[in-house]
Amino acid sequence: MGLLDKIKGQLIDVIEWKDDSNDTMVHRYENNGKEIMMGAQLTVRESQVAIMVNEGKLADVFQPGRYELSTQNMPIMTALKSWKYGFNSPFKAEVYFINTKQFLDQKWGTSNPVMMRDAEFGMIRLRAFGIYSFRVSDPVAFLKEVFGTTAYMSVEGVTGQIKRTLVSGLSDAIAQSKIPALDLAANYDELSQFALNTLAPRVANLGLKLESFVIENISLPDEVEKAIDRRTSMGVVGDLNQYTQFQAAEAMRDAANNPNGMGGIGAGMGAAAMMAQAMQNAAQAPVVPQYQQAAPAQQPQEIRQAADSAAPAADTKFCSECGQRIPRSAKFCPECGAKQA
């Protein structure tokens, strides 16, 4: 290897970052102690921003594209290095690649309940969870406020801060939305959009942009859940008078199915009273009495027996000799023994 090749081997002529991960936010180009050649090729891909740092000081920022490094496209670095126009010597600098793509499906949740003041229930505690997405919107502010000169940073390095910021501001967002507690479940979309507009400024100073904020579920206290159930039941019932009559009829049927139980008898009697009262109250016109046909008077036992004796049965006859009732099929009278015709 010649001297010229050896010198070139100690210089950097291509600078790029091929991101093969899903959660890397910052990657510092590893120069391994080498210097950057003047005229080196810098490639910045879509969803990337390259920042050049000289001795800890922020220098030039490169948007997506391909650059041939020179004093013309590195004005800040040129000023920091005090380079003369047309300077061609190698130089040392740190190059950071910032990932500006959107990081999706980030989870958030309330580890502790958040407080909400409701017009109907007063102060109540809520628990909620959902997802959000964000991106780096200002790489320079992100470098200054978050990662500094860290060689590598992943999404995990900022999500903890973002989650705490979102959860702490959620109660304010819910209060400002003025959505009643009973209507929260039906207004997740509206509340999510309102929360997004309210919470986005809280992370903007970090150089981040909150792209979406989705509320998947809000858990209300048990007392509020029961109140919702009661109101739902009332809506299903509809006409209370008809519902009362229906309940009374159901109670009577249940009591009839348990005739031996005292509880069933008592329930049946109570239900019957309720049924009668409900029907009486529901009546709109006077009841017209209906006449019933009187049942035939019962005859004395002696008269019934005489009538039975006077009216021969269809399968009997009388003896021609003694007059005793005998079966029609008999050939001789069992009393007198006379032969029958």
Image (spheres, rainbow, N blue to C red):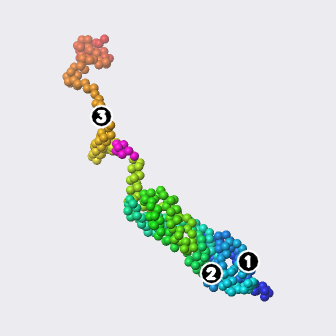
Report the residue marked by disc 1: 68
Q: Which quadrant, please, contains the N terminus?
A: bottom right
| Residue drawn at x 69%, y 80% as measured from the top left | 74
The one of 334 and 283 positioned closer to us in this rendering: 283
Q: Position of residue 177 (x, y in %)?
A: 46, 62
Q: Which amino acid, by three-letter code, is at mark 2?
A: Leu
Q: Residues within 10 Å of mark 1 (few under 14, many from 20)?
A: some
- Decide whether residue 233 is among the magenta residues: no
Report the residue marked by disc 2: 58
| Region of the chain picked out in magenta, as a range | 238-245
**Res. 250 visible in picture:** no
* Left or right of 89, for residue 217: left
Main secondary-structure element of the magenta-colored stretch = helix
Figure check: 80 above or below 19: below
> Of tags 2 and 3, which is closer to the observer?
2
| Residue drawn at x 67%, y 69% as measured from the top left | 46
Lower sequence index among marks 3 and 1: 1
